[in-house]
Image (spheres, helix red, strand yellow):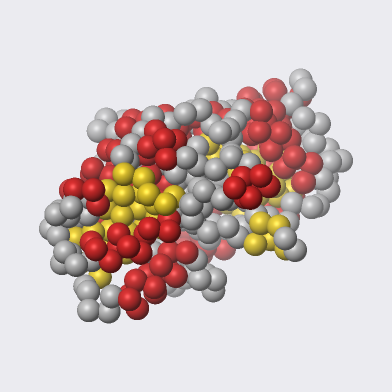
Amino acid sequence: MRNLIITNDLFIENRYRFSKLMAAKHLVILGSAEKMPRNGDQFFPYRQQSDFFYLTGIQNEKSSLLMFPDCPNPAFREVLFIEDYDEQKAIWEGHQLHNEEAIEISGIKQIMPASQFEMVLKETMNYVSGVYLNNNEYIKFSSEIADNQSLLIRLIKQKYPLHTFQRAAPLLEQLRTIKSKQEIELIQTACDITGKAFERLLKFPITGKHEFEIQAEIEHEFTINRANGHGYYPIIAGGENACVLHYTANNKGLQDGDLLLLDFGAEYANYSADLSRTIPVNGKFTPRQKQCYEAVLRVFKKAKLLYKPGITIDQINKEVWKYMELEMINLGLLTAENIAKQNPDKPLYRQYLMHGVAHHIGLDVHDVGSKFEPLKAGMILTCEPGIYIREEKIGIRIENDILITEAEPIDLMEHIPVEVDEIEKIMQHC
């Protein structure tokens, strides 16, 4: 395993907390992620479904979890099903997960082959009052591809149409938004690796290179520091590309005098970091670039102070948009007179800042959590104000990951260079 060992008390505690949210005489069934075909006889690298990993720690396909705390048969109160051993698969693909390993990773004592899932399900369904099933309910995401979770839901509902079904996602969201001590340490590791990659770039001669070469430097640093890879596909955007919010082509040349917007984060043990920085390709900001950068940096520093229990992401967004509106006036992009006459449903600042400035982060880079739910200690969110001036080929975003505490917020990326002088000093002496 690339990452260092995660002790199974994390997953034992996660299952315990989930069971305390379950209604009496209910069971929950979760399935692992499927392997995604790439082309020919190839699959994309496997990545476990986040909720399944959260409750089990298991990284293998063709696995299932059944939890039924009130089951009259004690053997079926917590069962992990893993892929049946296949000698030919072991010869061609290597090591397969054994029962003892599954117990050590997950802390689940009852391990059974996947071929026995139907038998155990049939027995346990006789005793339940209801069943929790899980699906991806992230509000901004939809897929035309039926994943393993949706196929499992369809199968169980067809076989047991007279049972009552409930959503597991709200319970998992309630748990996953609050990070445990071990989770915070894992995310901090992901942040640290991300910071190492950024500092590597600051020492790398960028002028004349291509965006994909910058991406390669990031991936090199990720790999030698035990990261799984990217937590999301990186944005390496030079010049006018920086004004495309989700630019991921990463194939253009980098020109002297342009800015380079970087949005990337390492994934370590399935936990993701999320960093954004904007640097001058030639190592020196022009006066106008510096003026715009420092405007965003001022807002970034003010915005971080908002990250306290009780406030919502929606409220943070609204406050930060006001901060940026004032900076846009100072930059000559807007006037107070025009703002006073604007359509409140189409505010003028949206010409230069089109996105929100905070989202939860954890097992997914856009982790579960509502923008209307008050923040609580233990949550980790991004802080990412930006400005995008297409006519000047200036796109700037600054982003760190912030831990909410009962006291002051903790910036998990505080150690990563962000000041103009810091960035220029390192780049000029590479």
| In the displayed structure image, the side of residue 270 where residue 395 appears, left or right | right
Decide if residue 182 is on the left or right side of residue 84.
Answer: left
Residue 162, relative to residue 322: is it above or below?
below
Which quadrant does the N terminus fall into?
top right
Q: Determine if residue 137 is in view.
A: no
Of the 4 image quadrants, the one containing the C terminus is top right
Q: Nearer the viewer, residue 323 or 116?
A: 116
Q: With respect to residue 134, does 301 lie above or below? A: above
Quadrant position of residue 291: top right
Please tell me which residue is depicted at 57% across the width and 63% down the height of the picture.
351
Q: Which residue shows up at 31% across the image and 44% down it?
A: 110
| 137 lies left or right of 312 | right
Front-most of residues 162 and 49: 162
Q: Is residue 200 visible?
A: yes
From the viewer's side, name the closer residue of 155 and 86. 86
Give residue 421's position: percent from left, percent from top: 64, 26
Residue located 27% across and 38% down the image = 13
Q: In the rendered view, would you say 8 is above or below 77? A: above
**Toward which corner of the image does residue 168 lie, by quadrant?**
bottom left
Residue 15 image offset from top left, x and y in percent: 28, 45
- Count of numbered badges drawn on the protein: 0
